[in-house]
């Protein structure tokens, strides 16, 4: 084979090199051309980074030199301060046009802010170099009209929370002021000793105070709030016998003010003028938590909002809370306003007016405040709820001024459970259930009001099948007619009446009165029950149900509603808490029983209060006609249990439909050895006297 010369191979190699170079440049040309994005595409990508707060990525996309040598630090701070400061969200970008020659993009931007929607049309200009297109950035790309020396300002107009009023316009929850103890750091002397002393007087941890003082905004001459404390009112100190708690608080605040650097300032806060008397009804508000903000996202809450935690404050939260207003505007270097960008007007919370009468509420609270009790009062002709009381109680203001861990522990560990809302629960009714059984017997035709059931003395059982179980009563009835049985509160008569009605019929009747059903009322109440199961299981249970024992539990407001039927021809009123200028009867259950049965039972309850032999005679008044029923419910493990307690009941009402028409149902725990139901009769009578004055 003939060998080729060196020159031949050199030519071949040179050709390959040239081809490689050409191919490299061709490939490079196509690679750059296909990977470089147009300005309109880059602008869309740039804007996508804003909601994600990816400011570093945005900075990489700008031409730094053409953007006035903007530093990364300034760029990130400027963008984040404005976008996050105005609460930017829901950004939307529309590209209008792209001018290839001028390398500019016309676009429309829209987004939501704390002050509402902002939208504008703007131009973005790009440069081009070997790295492709780069954005020329200046402040006007954030907001038109903005330059490097101008500032975007946000002004929040705080919404006032609506007030809660009683039926006569008295404020029972409103906007008052509280005191705030704090320090001016620059005036503190001997920091270590001073902070220890302040911590002791305020019931705070020294570390918590240090944390507040180390916040980024703190300066030597600024007031740093530490803790909300009770506001001392001079009127309380000048009263004849000021509360010992008020005197101690005055002394504590005086000691605080002796410390150099300590100040006590006032601030707006929720206030409950009647404190404990209405706590379970009004409830209280607290500062929102992170969980609240997440749960109520988009509902207008911010980190410094309050939210209703219980009672009417929580029930009517959406109406009471209002919504903050907001302005976004641009100011020049001298602070003068140049342009308003967005404005959302403030919406103050609505006032809520309740049907409650503050005087009746306070009268009931004062009578029972030392007891474990509950009381409800309604207008028995309109269904207006006039009072809802639970004792012992707590002070709603304590949740505003703040409680120490020790105070919170004392409140929760108190054996009398002051935080427990008793008027929402269901209780064993005892003898106040007897008018219900009377109505059931008359309505089902199993009871004839004039029939004598026979005098059984103080102890009775149906037959030997009951073994050692007997029905006992405190007063023998002779003759044992319906009226006399109501007057004497005879357990035996009503046990017999229940047996005559029968378990099936009684169950049907009670379900017809709303048992096992939720009460149609603004505040959720415990359901009343006639048994722990869906039926009355035994004959003994049926007999016990007849006089309000067995497994019967009833909510006091439900009981009052049932009693309203005795004044409304057998129709059960629907209760309501919101005030109505012209309140009229609205029935929850129409024709629960007939007018004849209603009138017959009412006749017996009139004698309970007006007959000297009646168990409620202590409430009798010469100038007004009252009717009602007493009750003592035994809470014990068995019939032989002597260690059980007793609940005392009294439900009483004015039978005339006047402006003062009222029905009061009160229950007090632990009345054994204190007069039983008579204890409750006396206290309720005092309340009625005050009410009628």
Image (cartoon, helix red, strand yellow):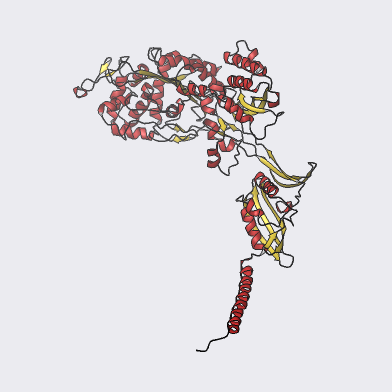
| Residue 348 figure quarter | top right
- Residue that protrudes farthest toward the left in the picture: 464
- For the residue pair 265 and 60, the one nearer the viewer reads as 60
Left or right: where does residue 571 sit relative to residue 324? left
Which residue is at the far bottom? 2
- Which residue is found at the position 65% from the left and 61% from the top? 42
Picture quarter containing residue 20? bottom right
Q: Position of residue 316 (x, y in %)?
A: 55, 35
Along the line of sight, the residue nearer the viewer: 650 or 487: 650
Furthest-top residue in this view = 240
Across and down, in percent, residue 609 comes to: 43, 17
**Residue 104 seen:** no
**Residue 304 against residue 187 in the figure, above or below:** below
Q: Tell me the residue at 63%/73% (across/down).
A: 25
Q: Position of residue 590 (x, y in %)?
A: 43, 35
Left or right for 296, reference 258? left
Percent of width and height locating residue 3: 53, 87
Indicate the quadrant containing the C terminus: top left, top right, bottom left or bottom right: top right
Observer-nearest of 227 and 212: 212
């Amino acid at each position: 084979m003939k060998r080729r010369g060196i020159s031949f191979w050199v030519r071949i190699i040179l050709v390959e090199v040239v081809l490689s170079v050409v191919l490299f440049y061709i490939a490079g040309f196509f690679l750059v051309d296909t990977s470089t994005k147009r300005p309109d595409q880059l602008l869309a990508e740039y804007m996508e980074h804003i909601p994600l707060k990816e400011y570093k990525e945005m900075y990489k996309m700008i031409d730094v030199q053409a953007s006035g040598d903007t530093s990364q630090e300034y760029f990130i701070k400027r963008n984040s301060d404005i976008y996050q400061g105005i609460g930017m969200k829901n950004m939307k970008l529309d590209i209008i046009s792209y001018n290839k020659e001028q390398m500019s993009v016309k676009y429309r931007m829209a987004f939501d802010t704390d002050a509402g929607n902002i939208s504008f049309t703007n131009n973005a200009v790009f440069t081009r170099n070997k790295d492709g297109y780069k954005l020329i950035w200046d402040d006007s790309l954030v907001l038109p009209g903005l330059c490097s020396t101008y500032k975007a300002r946000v002004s929040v107009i705080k919404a006032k929370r609506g007030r809660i009023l009683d039926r006569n316009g008295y404020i029972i929850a409103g906007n008052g002021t509280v005191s705030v103890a704090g320090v001016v750091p620059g005036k503190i002397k001997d920091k270590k000793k001073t902070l220890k002393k302040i911590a002791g007087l305020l019931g705070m941890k020294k570390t918590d105070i240090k944390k507040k003082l180390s916040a980024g905004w703190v300066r030597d001459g600024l007031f740093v709030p530490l803790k909300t404390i009770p506001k001392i009112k001079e009127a309380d100190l000048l009263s004849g016998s000021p509360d010992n708690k008020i005197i101690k608080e005055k002394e504590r605040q005086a000691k605080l003010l002796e410390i150099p650097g300590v100040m006590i300032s006032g601030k707006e806060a929720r206030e409950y003028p009647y404190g404990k008397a209405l706590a379970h009804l009004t409830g209280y508000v607290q500062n929102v938590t992170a969980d609240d903000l997440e749960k109520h996202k988009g509902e207008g809450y911010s980190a410094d909002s309050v939210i209703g935690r219980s009672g009417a404050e929580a029930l009517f939260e959406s109406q009471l809370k209002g919504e903050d207003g907001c302005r976004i505007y641009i100011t020049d270097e001298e602070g003068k306003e140049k342009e308003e960008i967005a404005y959302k007007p403030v919406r103050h919370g609505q006032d809520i007016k309740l049907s409650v009468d503050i005087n009746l509420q306070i009268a009931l609270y004062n009578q029972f405040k030392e007891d474990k009790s509950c009381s409800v009062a309604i207008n028995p002709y309109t269904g207006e709820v006039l009072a809802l009381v639970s004792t012992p109680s707590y002070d709603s203001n304590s949740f505003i001024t703040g409680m120490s861990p020790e105070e919170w522990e004392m409140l929760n560990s108190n054996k009398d459970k002051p935080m427990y809302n008793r008027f929402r629960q269901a209780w064993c009714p005892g003898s106040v259930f007897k008018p219900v059984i009377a109505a059931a017997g008359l309505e089902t035709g199993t009871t004839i009001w004039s029939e004598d059931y026979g005098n059984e003395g103080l102890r009775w059982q149906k037959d030997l099948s009951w073994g050692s179980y007997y029905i006992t009563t405190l007063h023998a009835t002779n003759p044992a007619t319906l009226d006399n049985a109501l007057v004497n509160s005879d357990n035996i008569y009503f046990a017999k009446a229940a047996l005559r009605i029968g378990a099936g019929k009684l169950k049907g009747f009670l379900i017809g009165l709303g048992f096992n059903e939720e009460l149609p009322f603004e505040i959720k109440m415990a359901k009343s029950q006639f048994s722990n199961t869906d039926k009355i299981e035994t004959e003994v249970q049926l007999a016990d149900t007849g006089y309000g024992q067995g497994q019967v539990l009833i909510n006091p407001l439900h009981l009052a509603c049932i009693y309203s039927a005795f004044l409304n021809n057998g129709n059960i009123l629907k209760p309501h808490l919101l005030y109505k200028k012209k309140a009229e009867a609205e029935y929850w259950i129409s024709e629960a029983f007939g007018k004849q049965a209603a009138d017959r039972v009412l006749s017996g309850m009139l004698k309970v209060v007006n007959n000297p032999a009646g168990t409620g005679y202590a409430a009798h008044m010469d100038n007004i006609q009252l009717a009602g029923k007493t009750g003592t419910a035994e809470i014990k493990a068995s019939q032989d249990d002597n260690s059980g307690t007793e609940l005392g009941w009294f439900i009483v009402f004015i039978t005339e439909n006047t402006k003062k028409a009222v029905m009061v149902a009160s229950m007090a725990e632990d009345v054994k050895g204190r007069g039983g139901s008579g204890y409750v009769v006396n206290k309720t009578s005092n309340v009625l006297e005050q009410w009628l004055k």
